Amino acid sequence: MTPSTRGGLRLVVIQALVFSLFATLFVRLYYLQVVSGDEYQGRAAAQSVREIVVQPTRGLIVDDQGRPLVANRLTWVVSLDRTVLGKLPADKRKILIRRVGRVIDLKPQRIEKKLLTCGNEDSEPGVCWNGSPYQPVPVVQDLAQDRAQRLREQPEDFPGVVVEQQTVRAYPRPFGINAAHLLGYLSPITEDELDTATDGGDQSVNGASVVGRAGIEQEYDAYLRGMPGYQQVEVDSMGRVIGDEATVEAQPGDTLVTSLDAKVQSVVEKQLNEMMTTARGTLDTVTGRNYVADSGAAVVMEADTGRIVAMASQPTYDPSVWVGGITKKQLSELYSEKAGTPLLSRATQGQFAPGSTWKPFMTSAALTNGYSTDASLPCGSSFQVGNRAFKNYESGAYGSIGFAKALEVSCNTFFYKVGFDYWQQYGSDADDVDARDPLVEEAEEYGFGAETGIDLPGEASGRIADRKWKRDYYRSMKKFYCGIADAPQDAETSDFVYKFAYEFCIEGYKYKVTDAVNFAIGQGDTIVTPLQLARGYAAIANGGTLYAPRVGRAVVAADGTVIRRIAPEVTGRVDLPPGIQGYIDEALTGVTRVGTMAWRMGGFPEEVPIRSKTGSAEVYGKQSTSWVASYSDDYVVVMMVSQGGTGSGTSGPGVRAIWESLYGVQGEDVVPARAAIPGTVLPQRLPSFRRDGTILPPATDPQERS
């Protein structure tokens, strides 16, 4: 074969090869564009469409007149699209973060922390992002409008930056109220909560949701949160929205109508704060220094339903501090013991010795278990138990008196004798853990030592310090106190502590007569919450019915449809023999008119009978706890100030002011309640919710009650 022939053959082979390659290419193109064109077009379209969660507007919380207690407001929110950021070179990404930080006044390091997915080893709880990885991550809210517009008007300088208006919680504070412990707060959903919701098929939450963490916000979260919507948007290669694909509208949350009355709440908060402030400026003659008055609580409850009209706790905090995320410093302040642990609700979670406010329940127990209303017992200056003299308050003595007079003058030695008699009759064997105790039984009937069942989370149960409790406590603490008793006493251990530890180590399990007499006057290891005490007095007022206290009244949809009415719930009954309620009523009326509360209630109109009991509970190492518990035919009013001194001395004026506001008392005259404070009688009807968003108070007859 000649060279020219061989060259021609190679050319043919190359041409055939090139032709076959082009043929293969054309066949492949035909397959991709014609045969599989629809499939790949769909894939391409899918890659350019993103699903964005549209958070619902959370439902309102209103009082019984329709006044908003918690509402919503619009705020400018800046979010960063991590998909777009991920396409930028590292140096450009860093420059962009710094540029955004300058506009929104946030350090780049802080922004980077917000962009981290929760669960990442460098993530910070409460700061990291717990939502969808395809959702823009919010990095700041409440941005000033001029700064928001700057970001919106220069999109070429801020790729991947999303600026939009969203709703966040707002607190209108009608009449200046705070109500933080009642209302609660919101915070981002946790990963565990989201997993639980997903496993249960709950579609009302997603990774970007915020949920209720305390108070009403937590208890009724399922109603308030609404249902999220979804928006499918078409985006370009830089993540910029270039069109809408589909939208599922978010459903707003339902409105919760409460039994609270904002006007009464404002009076209660003001009076509690004033009583504590006054106490701090008052000398405690026992300790030689002013009262600390470190915390306090007040409750106004409907006697016949258990509905909460107002409830306050001090110290408190601004609920709006949670909006937009809370800083570590702010959070530590809420939990700080030095600041008084503001996050703790003293009304439902604070536990205190009840002092003499306990005596009406002990009277009920005694008159139900052998004593008669004609019984007469000595009220001496002291009551001897073994080698110890238990003294009356300020060593006062009144001779032989009955239960009514004992309540009126708050005679300790009278009730010491009652406790002593029952201990002798049923439980003188200190080792008998099952011995009967009528006083303990009655206290338990009134619901003490157990949660009331209020529709607020985190309620404390209080404690009945009976024989079983003492045995259990001994077992749990024996090692600790025996460790102190067995060691040589050092300079840091006081004589009292060393002696107590020694005695506890040997016989701390025994329920002694000293425990019994202390129990009878609300001292010792028994503790109650202000809410428990209010419910107990409500049971006396209404003839023995125990209600689970309720803050919620009804759940109403955005269109005004009533979804659920929250009815009062009976949880127990106290068996009161005939005439006992009337006897206690009359005795406690005497406390108000001529007894320990008389100097604070002088001139109060007699057509509105107020029954009351004062208390000054002694606490080892602290100043006395001030108590006043009172009730009328309609309401119960309880106020407590920890380390505040005497009951009537500190809490008395505040309690009177609350009663005056409830019944419209001006001087010695009674004005119809609605003329003074509209809405203090809980209306039977609910507020009216119009389609334009306005809320009208219910049209009610003042005599109507729910």
Image (cartoon, helix red, strand yellow):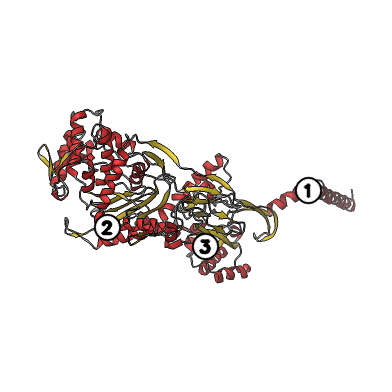
Spatial CA distance of label 1 from label 3 is: 43 Å
Q: Mark 3 points at which residue?
A: 141
Q: Which of marks 1 and 2 is nearer the N terminus?
A: 1
Q: Where is residue 241 in the image (x, y as percent from the top left)?
A: 67, 60
Is residue 234 left or right of 646 when viewed as pictured?
right
Q: The disc labelled 3 sits on which kind of residue?
A: Gln
Spatial CA distance of label 1 from label 2 is: 90 Å
Picture disc at residue 38: 1
Q: Which of marks 1 and 3 is nearer the N terminus?
A: 1
Q: Where is residue 116 in the image (x, y as percent from the top left)?
A: 51, 54
Q: The disc labelled 1 sits on which kind of residue?
A: Asp
Quick one: 266 or 17, which is closer to the camera?
266
Spatial CA distance of label 2 from label 3 is: 54 Å
Q: Is mark 3 on a helix, strand or loop?
A: strand
Picture disc at residue 602: 2
Q: Earlier in the sequence, mark 2 or mark 3?
A: 3
Quick one: 701 or 317, which is closer to the camera?
701
Q: Where is residue 592 in the image (x, y as percent from the top left)?
A: 27, 51
